[in-house]
């Protein structure tokens, strides 16, 4: 190989490396717009409980929150109050639409109204972003709010306290028909389990 061919090959390799490096710089450019989406949850009576939500992009090419792994994105929020639930970075102008719904198991010991919201984010060329929220009826709302109320305990099956028996049945108290030392709970050995 002549010296000119070697120099030409080396120059082409350097040029290729520079082009790949520039491509990496362009793709890691700062976001055009960043939007943080708030959710309000009110938990009564104990505000230190976690509830789950699911965000789904309506177009597979929509950016997802920075902490998301895939689409849909399920996350939890703990405690009463307004939470900055997630942040999405947008590289390009456009209209981005998402669906947000509560996804806590209905067997959880709280009552609430299940809801689904449509989130539309309008990103303009100048980096301005507008967040529009619509409820299930398609009406624009100012916020996404969930109210959780603890379900009442069944008086026939009191919650066990530490160290107590979990057998269902009335407890022995003054004025009850059970005499001390007797049990009104079913015999577990005759249970149909």
Image (cartoon, helix red, strand yellow):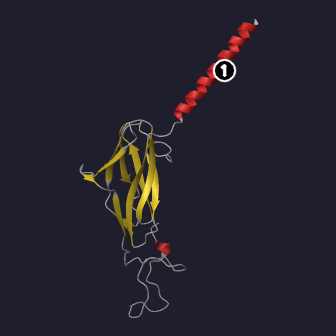
Residue at (42%, 78%) from the top-left corner?
158
- In depth, the one of 82 and 21 nearer the eye is 21
Q: Position of residue 187 (x, y in %)?
A: 47, 77
**Considering only vertical position in the picture, is 5 above or below 58?**
above
Compared with 158, 40 (above or below) is above
Q: Give the image location of residue 174, x and y in percent.
A: 41, 94
Is 142 left or right of 77, judged from the image as shown?
left
Neighbor class of circle 1 (other Cα within 10 Å; few <14, some 14-19, many 20+) is few
Relative placement, left or right, of 13 versus 184 is right
The part of the image, by quadrant, that contains residue 152 is bottom left
Q: Which residue lies furthest to the top in this view?
A: 2
Residue 64 visible somewhere in the drawing: no
**Which residue has dot 1 on it?**
14
Q: Quadrant of the N terminus?
A: top right
Q: Residue, x 62% and y 24% (percent of image)?
A: 18
Q: Is residue 98 left or right of residue 159?
A: left
Q: Which of 64 and 7 is in front in this view?
A: 7
Q: Is residue 188 above or below residue 4?
A: below
Q: In this view, does 137 lie to the left or right of 166?
A: left
Q: In the orientation shown, which residue stands out farthest toward the front?
A: 126
Q: Is residue 16 visible?
A: yes
- Residue 52 vs residue 178, the one in the foreground: 52
**Residue 85 x, y percent position in the rendering:** 44, 55
């Amino acid at each position: 190989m002549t010296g000119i061919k070697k120099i030409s090959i080396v120059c082409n390799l350097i040029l290729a490396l520079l082009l790949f490096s520039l491509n990496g710089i362009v793709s890691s450019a700062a976001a055009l717009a960043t939007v943080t989406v708030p959710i309000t949850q009110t938990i009564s009576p104990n505000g230190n409980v976690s509830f789950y939500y699911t965000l789904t992009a309506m177009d597979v090419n929509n950016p997802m929150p920075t902490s998301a792994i895939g689409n849909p994105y399920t996350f939890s929020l703990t405690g009463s109050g307004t939470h900055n639930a997630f942040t999405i970075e947008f590289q390009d102008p456009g209209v981005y639409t998402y669906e947000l719904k509560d996804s806590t198991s209905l067997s959880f010991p709280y009552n609430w109204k299940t809801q689904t919201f449509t989130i539309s984010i309008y990103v303009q060329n100048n980096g301005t972003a507008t967040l529009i929220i619509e409820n299930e009826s398609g009406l624009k709302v100012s916020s996404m709010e969930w109210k959780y109320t603890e379900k009442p305990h069944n008086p026939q099956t009191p919650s066990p306290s530490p160290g107590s028996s979990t057998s269902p049945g009335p407890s022995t108290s003054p004025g009850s028909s059970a005499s001390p030392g007797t049990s009104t709970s079913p015999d577990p050995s005759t249970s149909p389990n």
